Image (cartoon, rainbow, N blue to C red):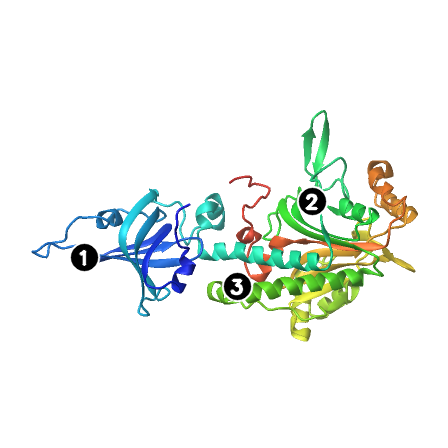
Amino acid sequence: MTSRVVIKNLSALDDGPVTVSGWVDTVRDQKKVQFVVLRDESGAVQLVNPRTTDADGIIVADEPATSISGLAQGTFVTVTGQLKHDERVKLGGIEIKLATLTVVSAAIPETPIAADSSLDKRMDWRFLDLRNPKQNLIFRIQTTFEHALRTYWIEHDFIELHTPKLMASASESRAELFEVGYFDTKAYLAQSPQFFKQMAQSAGFGKIFEVGPAFRADPSFTSRHSTEFTSVDSEISWIDSHEDVMQLHEELMVAGFSAVRAKHGDEVKALFDVEVTVPSQPFPRIPLAEAKEIVKSRGYEVPRDDDDMDPEGERQIAAYVAEKFGHEFVFLTDYASSIRPFYHMRHEGDESVTKSYDLIFNGTEISTGAQREHRINVLEAQAVEKGLDPKEIEGYLDFFRYGVPSHGGFGMGLARVLMLMLHQASIREVTYLFRGPTRLEP
């Protein structure tokens, strides 16, 4: 490999010869000196090339001056030169005096997107859009966040699983399912690893996690929906209630946000003008029925025919929590059984309410969790009540016929967490390659 120096590491080096590679960001082609801002995956550096003059003071058309004059934005080059520390240089207090410049890959002069291009246009040219330092930072934050979660899980003796994404039957219902041909039959893309997470509890794994793709055939065009997304899932055995799941969930969020703040907090502030706040524990908890009354008292009544909260209601309850508790997170608990899946456990003495929750972050739901129903007779009855044919989920029901501990877990949308952490307007901004009802490319 080329012995290039990553730009972010230049400031730690002594003055002297270096080799760097990157994309041309800007060129200032002045009469006596040329300046090039070069950017790689880690940062940017200023290159300087004093023009050569003859005995009469006439500019000489030599190299690398001629090549620099013809550089288009986005051209990838490798350069050698002398690194010099100079506090007068605004870009990091360093610059490189050029010796050689090699064009590795030239760019077309007219780029298809600009800083003011629409989001949809930028998605068409995502590989160019991702060269933006803000976009680059998003995915370094994602890496740090996932690593922190995984570190927590591993340090607490969780097992990592990679569950199938092709299923013979629906995981919850036939709604929002992608059906695909599968040899001489058909299969479905998994909406979640729900059944497989629960199978692991019956298998005796105890505590598991997965970070993987999930698919929803949801024709929504909102800023927070996608048809393919990364789901963060965890499931644990031997719980007493959904409170145990919420405690796990908030500990994971604290671990993730602590890591992002420590590693990227200054960059997030500089590029996004956002403070990464590590949430305090415990997170506020409000039963859904009470939350609706609070929202109503603030002048908004949820206009739904079912028992669920709506997006504006989530924003209103989040505003209330921010005012009363100074917190960005809130667990809405005890959702009605009428709007929850058949496998959510219901409260003893009140089957109209489930032992479940949604986690709201900055006004948007990012996760659903619950204690699961592990009693086979209750589970079958609840499936029938929800309109499911037990024969279609016979394989799933078998998990509960040979002894399974009480258990629960959650599924969380990774991109939604990033979107809300960075105060972005759309989930498209924080998804590497977005998939929606009208987008399958790039």
- Tell me if 53 is positioned left or right of 79 in this view: left
Farthest left residue in view: 56
Q: Quadrant of residue 53?
A: bottom left
Numbered circles on residues, count? 3
Cβ atoms under marks 2 and 3 closer than 8 Å:
no
Residue at 22% from the left image edge and 50% from the top image edge: 65
Question: Is any atom of residue 284 visible in this view?
Answer: yes
Q: Rounded to the nearest whole Å, what is the CA distance between mark 2 and mark 3?
A: 29 Å
For badge 3, the amino acid type reads His
Cβ atoms under marks 1 and 3 closer than 8 Å:
no
Residue at 47% from the left image edge and 66% from the top image edge: 270
Find disc 2 in the rendering and name its residue. 162
Compared with 401, 39 (above or below) is below
For badge 1, the amino acid type reads Lys
Farthest top residue in view: 184
The local crowd at label 1, few if under 14, some if 14 to 19, many if 20 or more residues have their Cα within 10 Å, is few
Q: Position of residue 148 (x, y in %)?
A: 63, 59
Q: Position of residue 160 (x, y in %)?
A: 70, 50
Q: Nearer the viewer, mark 1 or mark 2?
A: 2
The local secondary structure at tag 2 comes to: loop
Foreground residue among 264 and 396: 264
Q: Rounded to the nearest whole Å, what is the CA distance between mark 1 and mark 2?
A: 60 Å
Find disc 1 in the rendering and name its residue. 31
Find disc 3 in the rendering and name its residue. 264
